[in-house]
Amino acid sequence: MKPTTNSVPDPAVLEATRSRAASWPFRSVLIANRGEIAVRILRTVQTLGLEGVVVYHAADRKAPAVQMADQAIEITGATPVAAYLDAKQILAAAKSSGAGAIHPGYGFLSENAGFARAVAEAGLVFVGPTPEQIELMGDKVRARAFVEKGGFPVAPSAIEDDDPATFAERALKVPFPLLIKPAAGGGGKGMRIVREPGQLKAELERARSEGQRYFGDGRLYVERYIENPRHIEVQVLGDAHGNVVHLFERECSVQRRFQKIVEETPSPALSPELRKRICETAAGIAREAGYRNAGTVEFIFGAGGAPGTGNGAGNPEFYFLEMNTRLQVEHPVTEMITGKDLVLEQLRVAAGEKLGFTQEQVTSSGHSIEFRIYAEDASRGYTPTTGPVLVLRPPQGEGVRVDSGIVEGQDVTAAFDPMLAKLIVTGRDRTEAIARADKALAEYALLGCITNTAFLRRLLNHQAFVDGAVHTGFLDAHPEIAAQPELTPATLHKLLAASALMTKPMRDVADLVPDMHAAIGSWSN
Amino acid sequence: MHHAFKLEENEYNLELSRGPAGYRLHLADRTIPVNLHLEDDGSAVLTVNGRSEKVLVATRGDDVFIHLGGVAYQLRYEHPLQRLAAQAQGSAEDHVRAPMPGSLVALHAKPGQTVARGESLLVMESMKMETTIAAPRDGVVESVHFAIGQTFDRDALLLSLVAAIVEGKKS
């Protein structure tokens, strides 16, 4: 049977890259990260015939990346996280292991311009963008100004400080509805949504007095307010020779505490025309920056103001939010629909090669959804859980990919981020991907530490998710998805039966009763 | 009923016995024929009321973990003696426990220090957020069980309080 999903990477591309890699400026890559992403990067590094080196803190001694690496070097720190942030130790490990390049993964030192510079100064290759590009995109205000100057869409706004005398006038030019925010604000305090231009003056006064009261500062700014916004981002890839392509979008609207839980591609919110526009905008921004490496341009997307709310009704809109200058957690869904290995492409670019394909050669087929497997209890406000991994049975099957950072026998501790693994499920279309995901999540067994797999199944089967009608406030609007469903008596009886039979003191007592007594006992009931 | 399991916040009393046809689970209102057969591959076949299905089970100390019907559950065996002891022991307010897993960021009280109800005892960090743990009642700090920077699990005993000795009532 012909597989219904792409193989990543294309075997011919892998073979050709492997032979060219023999003459790359580095033959060994140190991965300055941990968990599932260290395993993910190692896989491509080793498949290309390169040596894979990892650094690890003692808390990760049993982690799969440490077992899999050609060399593993222990690093220390005041806390386990501090060890992975210690550039000095990591550079020393690169030197002692003979690594020629450092891949930072995501998080930790991946968007630290100082680290990128130190890597280059040590004579090593940084698998990432230039330090200047990290600095530009890392500064939200500078990045926004850069994007706006290039003629790309940023959310319309008016800042009082720019010219206090004309503030009210400029605010009126921002399309309604709009949001007034205190300049000194935070945490949602003093924010006001204004739907009608006629109310603006009165609302500005109220917001000013609130700002004064909360922050001792009455200065304001206003920006376009998007109802039920969706988070849509575009994968881009650039080389050191000025070539930039996009690899389509990902929708990451399902979030809790501003952190993504489920990501998919294509986005169910975009028409083909809109998809083309948003992807080309992202590629344009990356091109403008002369971007080198894999990167992600994030947008806020609104399907259009609700009827009767003034401007924008029915007109989809999207605005630049920020650019992440690294490999993203959710990169696998892009790999599954394009057949491109993003880590392989990052390494090629870092080795100085040109991109191996043009924009026209990047195609998208099928639908892919990623679920982040977190050690957390959704019904207790998504608080982290800990415990030993006693039994681990990841799902298998057509269209199922698991990028995991844990193995049986490891302990899940509070020392790190609660993401344990990622389940990536791909189908010919969204319906098939959802059906496969439901089965895979049910089969995903981890005993010893509570995870969010049952919550993810409830989310996946929610009508709004099935309809693709989600937004970033979706989980807050539907707290019933996180709540623990009531146990049926039948399930409770099964759980108590299994528990009693697994508990030695109970089984021992039951087994002590002589058979004869038991036989008589059965009559007396 | 001497045995009990805790699931979420609920406690279930039960008894297990053996009859000619296998095990029987005795609950408050009914008796159910049950069996659990462990397979070589680590899975198990659970039979309840004559119906069998495949499950995964694991234990660690008094915790029982079960993957059943696509959902993982955690139950805890409550030792009969410990249940009695818990009832006899002082109030839960003597023990300050971690509301969630995390690490200790700051300590505001040391052993021997008298604290008032609501006074900050320590600050913990979890999910990149800091949470202040306050004294549940007036008392004296008997012991602190973690040092700054150390991580702990949910329900870990962070600090113990003893009753304050009221002036003039020393015996």
Image (spheres, coloured by chain):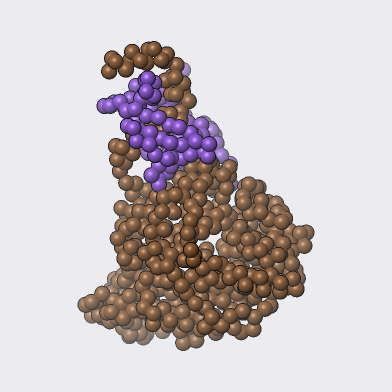
Chain colours: A brown, B purple
* Residue B61 x, y percent position in the rendering: 51, 31
- Examine the rendered structure and indicate whether residue B110 appears above or below residue A222: above
* Residue B15 x, y percent position in the rendering: 36, 23
User: Which residue occupies 37% across, 12% down?
Assistant: A517
- Examine the rendered structure and indicate whether residue B80 appears above or below residue A18: above
- Would you say residue B147 is visible in this rendering? yes
- Would you say residue A205 is visible in this rendering? no
* Relative side of A343 to A75, left or right: left
- Examine the rendered structure and indicate whether residue B152 appears above or below residue A496: below
Residue at the outermost left position:
A308
Count numbered badges in the picture.
0
Q: Quadrant of residue A153?
A: bottom left
User: Which residue occupies 54% across, 67% down?
Assistant: A7
Along the line of sight, the residue nearer the viewer: A414 or A359: A359
Along the line of sight, the residue nearer the viewer: A304 or B161: A304
* Residue A480 x, y percent position in the rendering: 31, 53
* Relative side of B54 to B13, left or right: right
User: Which residue occupies 35% across, 53% down?
Assistant: A458
Q: Quadrant of residue B28?
A: top left
User: Which residue occupies 57% across, 53% down?
Assistant: A405
Quadrant (top left, top right, bottom left, bottom right) of the C terminus of chain A? top left
